[in-house]
Image (spheres, grey):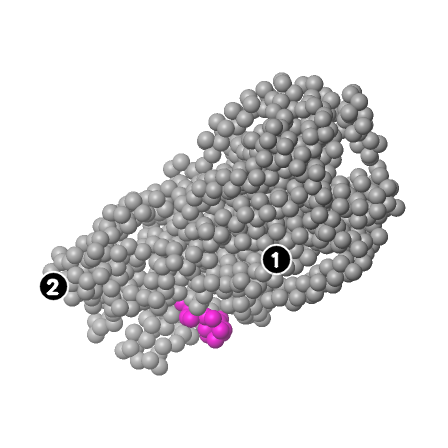
Amino acid sequence: MSENENIQLSAEDGKLRPALGRVLMRLRTPLIALFVILTVIFAWQMTQLRPDASFEKMIPVSHPYIVNFLKDRDDLSGLANSVRIIVETTKGDIFTPEYQETLHQVTDAAFYIDGVDRSGLQSLWTPNVRWLEVTEEGFVGGSVIPDDYDGSPRTLAKLRSNTLKSGQVGRLVANNFQSSIIVAPLTETDPVTGERLDYQKLSADLELQLRDKFQSDDIKIHITGFAKLVGDLVDGANLVATFFGVAFVITAVMLFFYSRCPWLTLGPLLCSTIAVVWQLGLLRLLGMGLDPYSILVPFLIFAVGISHSVQIINRFGQYCHDGIDNSESAFLAFVRLSKPGGIALLSDGVGFLTLRVIDIPVIKELAVVASIGIAVLVLTNLILLPLVLSYTGISKTCRRYLDRKANSKYSHWWYLSAVTKRAPAMTIIAVCAVLFVGGSWFGQQQKIGDLDPGAPELRPDSRYNLDNAFLTSNYSTSTDAFVVMVHTDPQQCGNFAALSAIDYFQGTMENVAGVQSALSLVDVSKLVIMGMNEGSPKWHAISRNQLILNNSLGRVPNNLLNTDCSMVPVILFLEDHKADTLDRVVAAAERFAKENDSDQIQFKLAAGNSGVDAATNIVIRSAQYRMLFWVYGVVTLLCLLTFRSVKITACIIVPLMLTSILGQALMAVLGIGVKVATLPVIALGVGIGVDYGIYIYSSLEHYLRQGHSLRQAYFSALKASGTAVAFTGLTLAVGVGTWIYSPIKFQADMGLMLTFMFFWNMLGALLLLPALAWLLNARETELKKVSS
């Protein structure tokens, strides 16, 4: 070991890290070659990675509501995962030969799209959409499209009459007769290959084979449904590469401005990019893909890599400027920063893993994706970067820049170090206490679930939301359907007791605020009984005569009961799927089920898109604070193990807690609900934000051990790490700030929240942490407990 190394190393560096550092420097050439080989392998694997989205991944499959839904899924044709294709005419109404020919062609085209459950397809041109009429001779009915349809005025008039008799106005046919719907239920797996449905391909097929082919000046095609939403999300997520490129350029410019050295700019960019390549390659090797919710995680890994790299190049540059050669400077940077960097990355990774307590597959996968990336950073940024720097060194321009910095009095840091004095510290703590109270109050207004109509994952002016708005404004039945499955013994769903219970349930639920209407086989039974009695309204009721009931149920559509008459879906059409609406509906339905369930009949929640949303909201509501408990518990435990001081741990954790509280308040003020897309942001912000505090206090500890006063030690810590922390916070905030312009709203929301949390975590580490150190007197006596 050289004389310089003996000067720089101290007892606090221990023995393990210097020994490991010597081995790394000795083997740096073969190690770099190994990194290059592995990067090529993972880059090849990365090119094979494909987007991965699934309906079941987005929902809490183990929640009782979803268990009930999946159990009855095959009997809920058209009520589960489906798309609605709206064919609109801009000239006249739908009863023209030209429109009907187009509708017929679109129906046929939809029939042959891969992923469509063809047996459940519904349109005016499918035989399962029928009309019914009571005449002097009894019931008369048939397919809506006349058997002898030829486009003539006579058959068009007959088609109009059949449509009015079918009861589909407001459902499959618009109230203004200017459009009609094709309902295409989907299969989750391909019945031939057994492979999972490719939502991106399905969305592309809908565009190519329907919208692009049939849309014209006279015909407009609107498409809604979960599959189309996911397809649009994947398409929008492809723009992430553009945002990544913009953030990469911004980071490169800011790194060069910070270091004034091309080598100290290139090293962090190279190693952080390698980390992303490794992460994506490992995902491919593990048989995983990237869904729209985790596709931003690679950029977060890049950002975290830059965060740690800045600390390393900052320390490396200082050692080089002090006259230590490149290899020894890299060795010392590794020894001094591997401990705080390793603890910070461990906190990040374990913090991300706590997301797995949320029982939604897509969030569990996000936790794995993020944790893999953090694990890779230990190799690429804590080990590879010092090895690379040992060859590159620093430029002459950088040395001159460091000369100017060395001669600087760092007056800005000296002024900032005053936060360790009584008056400034008390002022900061008082301001933060006010922010804590205010944030807690506003945070109570935070809502669970969606707060906007349509698909809140996309912007209000997106094509999908415009299509959804068209559907809502032109049809009587809402797109927000909450389905309750009523179970009886086989062949007993049509007896008087069951039908009267269902009728009572419908009447109860239709009086709940937010419920537009309800539909079940009871409505069909009443209409048929009324029709069999000359249409008299007084017969619009459930008959106690079982023979009459049996006759009335003979004309019930297949989607309103299952094959053995043991399950009846009751469809509640809601005004919206906002959290408050769903809470009221769930509470009323559960209360009814609790009071009326028996051995003969059970009311089971819930299917439909709103039923799934309700179950998701319940899971998120119960998991939100459990997740926070785990992430803060893990981070706190790691800090206690590292610093062995409750006071020091409090100095690091309290600023993070304040940022979390302010983040929740910001979500409440901006109307951002807690849902699948936004819930992980809280854990991500805590996991990444703890890095600032660990680096600051590790540096502060070093100078306190040398006998400095708290202010002098903090001033020295700011000179050593403060600039890097401030630069990192600003760089990360600016980088993720570019997401605000994403066409995908939840990505924009994530960008806004992460920008806020990065910035406030930085301020907390620089201002509140030292103020708390003064208040708690976490000084030399506490730091002496820390072992090397």
In the image, 442: left or right of 555?
A: right
Q: The disc labelled 1 sits on which kind of residue?
A: Gly
Q: Mark 1 packing: few (<14 Cα in 10 Å), some, or many (20+)?
A: many
The secondary structure type at the circle numbered 1 is: helix
Residue 451 image position (x, y, % from top left): 50, 63
Residue 113 image position (x, y, % from top left): 32, 44
Residue 520 image position (x, y, % from top left): 41, 66
* Nearer-the-camera pick, 587 or 281: 281
- The image quarter containing residue 183 is bottom left
In the image, 382: left or right of 194?
A: right
* Nearer-the-camera pick, 600 or 71: 71
Query: Which of the numbered marks, if any, corresponds to residue 663?
Result: 1
At x 77%, y 46%, the residue is 714
Residue bounds of the magenta highlight: 504-521
At x 58%, y 61%, the residue is 666
Q: The disc labelled 2 sits on which kind of residue?
A: Pro
At x 29%, y 68%, the residue is 175
569 over 781 or under it: above or below: below
Q: Which residue is mark 2?
A: 153
At x 74%, y 62%, the residue is 427
Instruction: Look at the image and tell me whether residue 642 can be seen.
Output: yes
In the image, 457: left or right of 387?
A: left
Instruction: Look at the image and tell me whether residue 62 can be seen.
Output: no
* Nearer-the-camera pick, 530 or 34: 34
Query: Which of the numbered marks, if any, corresponds to residue 590?
Result: none
Q: Mark 2 packing: few (<14 Cα in 10 Å), some, or many (20+)?
A: few
